Amino acid sequence: MASLDNFRLVVFRTVAGQRSFRKAAEELYLTQPAVSLQVKALEDDLGVQLFDRTGPHITLTAAGSVLLDYSLHIHALLAQAEHDIAALGREHAGQLALGASTTIAQYVLPRLLGEFRREHPRVLPTLISGNTEHIVEAVEQQKVELGFIEGPARSRDVKTAPFLADELVLIVSTAHEWAELESIPRSELAAAPLLMRERGSGTRRIIELALEKQDVRRRSLHVVMELDSTEAIKSAVEAGLGVGFVSRWSIAKDLRLGSGFKIVEVEGLRMRREFLIAYAKGPEPQGLAHEFLSFLFARAGMRRTPPEGGKAQAGRVHKIRK
């Protein structure tokens, strides 16, 4: 089913979200002049200026802010209309905008989205990824209907609910002196060259909080490198650049097929967490977002706990209480 949304409003919302004609053009796969032309035509139709272009960054005018609010409501209503019309034929169709923090986007959602698409082939999911902070911002700005994050949202405008169990584990190179040990004392960790995710990462936040509870202060850690993905940390560990904490979900395949790193336990330290579903404060998710949540909840009996020794086991998917 083709989108019912007005193309000029789509362009306007994208420019408003990106605060840049160039970035909006990249997101929409259009030329920058084409984006400017659509916005100018919309401004001419309304007889008002929607963006203030005088500063280093474009900003919404008062009229632009009003239009953005209405445009977001229109977009949501049209998406619901597409869903309800498709449901008359017992078939779900339309676009489903999702966001996920890096680990979930790489290791958890692809298989689930594949299953969902096999059941609903006329649904077109779009997925953006980034760290937890970025995904929460996307939920707040209604760029995505659902966000899947690895750490606390830390926003009053976003609701969250647990959806999948996970555990963070320490990995070291197979050539590392700790590789033959089953566990190490916490005191050893403070002096080790540590590879960490970037600031704003939910994984980093959980690691820091867990270590502080064990009296290992952030300032005492020997962080030698900050990296923006789990894959980068795994590669750096294999290369002998340091040790790092990663999600069990991210290394299940590596452990099954063989890799250049091993898990080493830290005495007294267990970092279990739950991945969270995030959505905007207000009404519960509707339309395709609701259908996707129902699809996830239907797998509640499949037990999706963190995989041990490389074998993905099952775990609870927690239902959002209404």
Image (cartoon, helix red, strand yellow):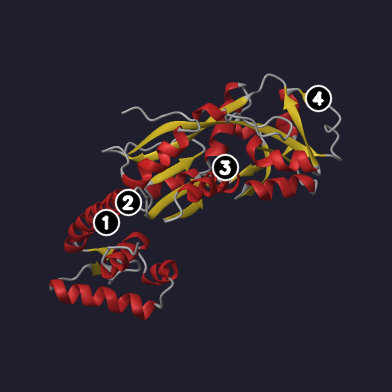
User: Which secondary structure, mark 3?
Assistant: loop
Q: Quadrant of residue 34?
A: bottom left
Q: Residue at x 24, y 77 (%)?
A: 40
Whole-angstrom CA distance, mark 1 to mark 3, is: 28 Å
- What mark, if any, has residue 182 been given in the picture? 4
Disc 2 to disc 4, how far (Cα)? 57 Å
Instruction: Inspect the image, locate mark 4, and give the three-letter code of the amino acid beneath it.
Output: Glu
Q: Which residue is mark 3?
A: 108
Above or below: residue 21 compared with residue 77: below
Towards the viewer: 49 or 314: 314
Looking at marks 1 and 4 on the same chain, the residue that comes earlier in the sequence is marked by 1
List x then y, in percent, for residue 198.
57, 46
Q: Residues within 10 Å of mark 4 (few under 14, many from 20)?
A: few
Closest to the camera, between mark 2 and mark 3, is 2
In the drawing, does residue 149 fall left or right of residue 78? right
Q: Which mark is residue 297?
A: none
Neighbourhood count class around disc 2 (C-alpha, 10 Å): few under 14, some 14–19, many 20 upward: few
Real-space Cα distance between discs 1 and 4? 54 Å
Could you tell me how far apart the alpha carbons at marks 2 and 1 are, in whole angstroms? 22 Å
Element carrying mark 1 = helix
What residue type is disc 3 on? Val
- Kindly identify which residue carries mark 1: 75
Which amino acid lies under the numbered mark 1 shown in the image of this protein?
His
